[in-house]
Amino acid sequence: MSTLTLVIVIVFIIGYACIALESVIKVNKAAIALLMFIACWTLFMIDPNAYLILESGEDIIRKATEIIEDHLGETSSTLFFLMGAMTIVELVDQNGGFDFVRTSLRTTNKRKLLWRIVFMTFFLSAILDNLTTSIVMIMVLHKLVAERTDRLIYASMVVIAANSGGAFSPIGDVTTIMLWNVGAVTSTGVITEIFVPSLVSMVIPAFILQYSLKGKLEMPENDGDAEEQELSKHERRTVFFMGVGGLIFVPIFKGLTGLPPFMGILLVLGLLWLVTEFFYGRRKNEKKKFKKRVTRVLGSIDMATILFFLGILMAVSCLQETGVLTTTGQWLNDVSKGNHYLVTGSIGVISSIVDNVPLVAGCMGMYDIAAVGDFAVDGIFWQLLAYCAGVGGSMLIIGSAAGVVVMGLERITFGWYLKKITWIAFVGYLTGIICYWGINAVIR
């Protein structure tokens, strides 16, 4: 490894550490990721000759610039997909599209409510995403469960169910979206082969935690309060079915047209935007500024998260160009003796400590998608990576975006989750891996 490459790796490690310690250093991880991205590529440009192979007469600066733009194009497809999906879900939520969730969950039986919550969260997460689903479900829980002790258990299961549900869907988790966008997994493959392990990783923890809930449920005093909506009930139902149905349609759109997934999500957003503008446009009160139309909802999108993904994915792409990730992948194969379960299982455990996005991005740089074998499209390695990186984050409250947002909304302490939930989530995670191994022993 050259001195320049070593410096790039050190910069990446320092940036990665600062991202992991975001709550300690009090600096938003998006800022760190952007600085890391620029620093790595600036160092790369000091001596691009060390990494690039040129054809006769080819300009080194132009070649390096083209490589950066190529990586930016691949990254942008993921970012546009996320922005479109986040806008659609926010629009549906703002316009009361998820009100039916609360109605369908209502019961006074604590254990029955737990199972309704986990299955609702599991399948909603596969359709929407684990972060948004967690927010929606916690808001619903506030209207259904008054006792804080019980609500902590329900909230913990929301984290586990959201991460498990996101793992088996091509649009349910950022890491799965990344693998789907680059063609490492297909929508059919990831759904058919990871669905059962993901379901098991949720059912086992729910079965254990149900024994912590006893007696009848006390409804909160403010139950039944409804926020004033700007659209009629029929219009809100239309927005819901167009939004959620559109998200389900995106994998079908990719299969029919062969176009990238982000184009499907932008198609759905454009149609939903058109319909909602028609709904608001026929309102007679022109002076009223409707707060829930798309132009205003766009301001609610978490751009810090989008910029974080931009920074981390581009920084990892720099490591890929230096050859560091390929070398690391070969070393992992040698150490594990080709045992993909050991490699991806370890990545899942690590993803509960640090962000799973750079971990998956790193793996995508370490290994090429092969024509046949375990690294082929829908190969064992890529499917295991999708499962482990998604479900593994449930083992710690800080291990996933869903966990972090629930931690903030419910004020769950790191220590309480570690003591009460971590071992349960680990049992579910491990059982899911064993289940995947059993399925593949028969299928493959």
Image: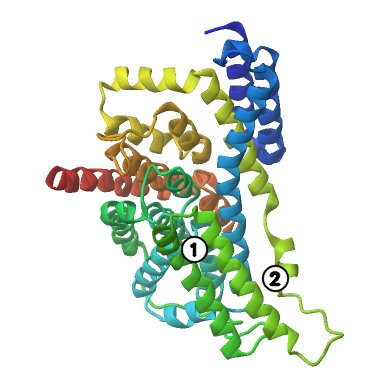
Q: Are marks 2 and 1 in contact (CB under 8 Å)?
A: no
Tell me which colouring the rendered structure shows. rainbow
Which element type, helix, strand or loop, lies under badge 1?
A: loop
Q: What is the quadrant of residue 234 in the picture?
A: bottom right
Q: Residue at x 54, y 15 (%)?
A: 53
Label 1 Cα crowd, 10 Å radius (few <14 / some 14-19 / many 20+): many
Q: 382 or 208: which is nearer to us? A: 382
Select label 2 or label 1 by which is in front. Answer: 2
Task: Categorize mark 2 by other alpha carbons within 10 Å: few (<14), some (14-19), many (20+).
Answer: many
- Residue 134 lies, with reference to residue 403, above or below; the image says below
Among the two numbered marks 2 and 1 on one chain, the one whose residue lies closer to the N terminus: 1
- Percent across and percent down for residue 115 are 35, 69
Q: Where residue 312 sits in the image (x, y, percent)? A: 60, 35
Single out the residue that lies furthest toward the left.
Answer: 442
What is the quadrant of the C terminus in the image?
top left
At 54% from the left edge and 80% from the top edge, which residue is drawn?
99
Quarter where residue 43 is shown: top right
Residue at position x 64%, y 23% from top?
A: 64
Label of residue 294 in the image: 2
Image coordinates for residue 206, horizontal then vertical, percent: 33, 60
**Type of amino acid at the residue the image marks with label 1:** Leu
Taking 428 as reference, is 313 left or right?
right
Q: Which residue is mark 1?
A: 128
Where residue 154 is drawn, which disc sits there? none
Q: Position of residue 389 (x, y in %)?
A: 41, 42
